[in-house]
Amino acid sequence: METNDRIAAMRDARLFGATQALSRLMLASMFGQKAYAGDRDYELILGYPKQPSFQTYRNLYEKWSLAGRIVDLPAKDTWKYPPAVTEHGRADTDFTKTFAELNERVHVWSSLMRLDQLAGIGQYGVMLIGVRDGGALEELVAPGSLSDQGPAGILYLRPLNEGSVTVYQKNSDTANERFGLPELYKLNLESGKEEVIVHWHRVLHVAENCTTSPWQGQSRLARCMQPLHNIIKLVGGGAEAAWLAMRPGTLLTTQPDYEIDDDDIKDTIQQEIKEYAHDMLRFLTIEGMNAQQLGTPDVPNIESQFDANIALIAAESGIPQRVLLGSAAGELAAAKYDLKQWAGVISARQQNYAGPEIVRPFVERLQAWGILPPTPDGFTLGIAEPGSDDYRWPTILQTDALEESEILRNKAAAVQSLTDKVQMIMPSTMTERRQWLGLPAEPPNEQIAVERAGEPSAVVVNALSNLAEGKITIEQFSQFVVSLLMEHVQE
């Protein structure tokens, strides 16, 4: 083997070994491992924060768009279509009307969404509920003391992140249902201002992903920390590498028999080289020197490494990659699957976290104060399907006109396929069929001046004429045509 070939083989072997070692280091660091009796700290070697603080998470959230999306997206989609707060679907009760008035006054849903966002940055978040009771912030609000004020008794809703909150005192009574929970808080309501002590009764405390602590959860960025830092290195390092690679090095040598003795000339040369390296100057006019370019322009490709880290973040956060990157509009079939998957995640979050851990404690607190009327039979969040007691929040998976028409056509075809063709008997009533189509159970009143006898096409033409003359609305026309088609579906 030639000497050059031997050297190349040794170099390739060393490169392969280094690559394998780096892969092992990255894998081990993901689990916080050390090696060689603790002498090698993988997190330290790879530059990962060993014990991230709230400020670490906050810096990522505020400065990196991807980190902000990991925190914000679950909250924004959870509260995108808030639930109806009613007494088992009844919209005409004092409780339902009062809650609607309260929301109009202090914007309940947007405040709860902000609280959800802020709580996701760190281990928890709180919302100070300002009330018109005349008491000090560090005192309990007396039950029923605001019953004569209604929604006007709420002055403001002030969401705060963990960085603005200090747990001043915890409940130490083992016989109390609030044992171990915060009793008093110190809140920094405005940067640079004096902190105020606030009783827990005036605060809505929210924490997600709690494990051993009932009031401290886990930041949404915690498990994504390492791949996030990898992407920061890739993007930042890749940008710098591209800058350097696209501007190859330059070798400057003096021409034969040329010497630089003058200090002014030396300063001029150094300044020109500095401008060439750091500014947009793309030429050198150095007397007595030769310039030779080193290497060729080359831009490193970081796409595969970026995709691998995005996949890790998607797995840890539960946000599908296309949704995470905001690219769900492309690749239609895959995008729809991702959106449906994400809609399921949000629905579970609404039912298991946002409802029982945020909305219900808030409403029940206001009922205890008398702001909202009592509900002896309880209250519900969302809307139930006909004949069901399962109340659900509105889905974030909205359908467009084309999808709705496809669904409507499939439903009509299903009804027709179940029709007894011999006895011409349909398996459902007109009321049921209208409900399947998303129409009111009862047909519209006879505001449509058409003669229903005769061929369906003639009737539709007559209805179109009435629509053109402004005698009926487009909604009335649509409902009439759909009901007419359903009447003739057995034919």
Image (cartoon, helix red, strand yellow):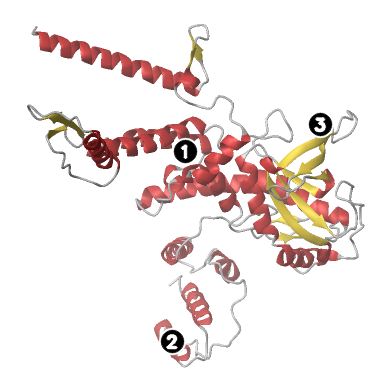
Q: Quadrant of the N terminus?
A: top left
Q: Amino acid at mark 3?
A: Gly
Q: Nearer the viewer, mark 2 or mark 1?
A: 1
Q: Amino acid at mark 2?
A: Leu
* Residue pictured at 47% horizontal, 50% vertical: 339
* Residue pictured at 64% horizontal, 36% vertical: 209
Q: Assess disc 1: are there few (<14), some (14-19) or many (≥20) residues with their C-alpha within 10 Å of its C-alpha.
A: some
The residue that label 3 is drawn on is 180
User: In the rendered structure, are the residues bearing label 3 and label 1 in contact, judged by CB atoms less than 8 Å apart?
Assistant: no
User: In the rendered structure, are the residues bearing label 2 and label 1 in contact, judged by CB atoms less than 8 Å apart?
Assistant: no
Q: Residue 244 falls in which quadrant of the image?
A: top left
User: Residue farthest to the front?
Assistant: 262
The residue that label 2 is drawn on is 464
The earlier-in-sequence mark between 2 and 1 is: 1
Q: Nearer the viewer, residue 116 or 473?
A: 116
Helix, strand, or loop for circle 1?
helix
Image coordinates for residue 81, horizontal then vertical, percent: 60, 58
* Residue pictured at 58% horizontal, 40% vertical: 58
**Image height check: is 22 above or below 251?**
above
Q: Nearer the viewer, residue 197 or 369?
A: 197
User: Residue farthest to the bottom?
Assistant: 469
Mark 2 and mark 3: span between their CA atoms? 70 Å
The earlier-in-sequence mark between 3 and 1 is: 3
Tell me if 490 is positioned left or right of 125 in this view: left
Q: Assess disc 2: are there few (<14), some (14-19) or many (≥20) residues with their C-alpha within 10 Å of its C-alpha.
A: some
| Label disc, if present, on residue 314 of the rendered structure | 1
Q: Nearer the viewer, residue 273 or 317?
A: 273
Q: Amino acid at mark 1?
A: Ala
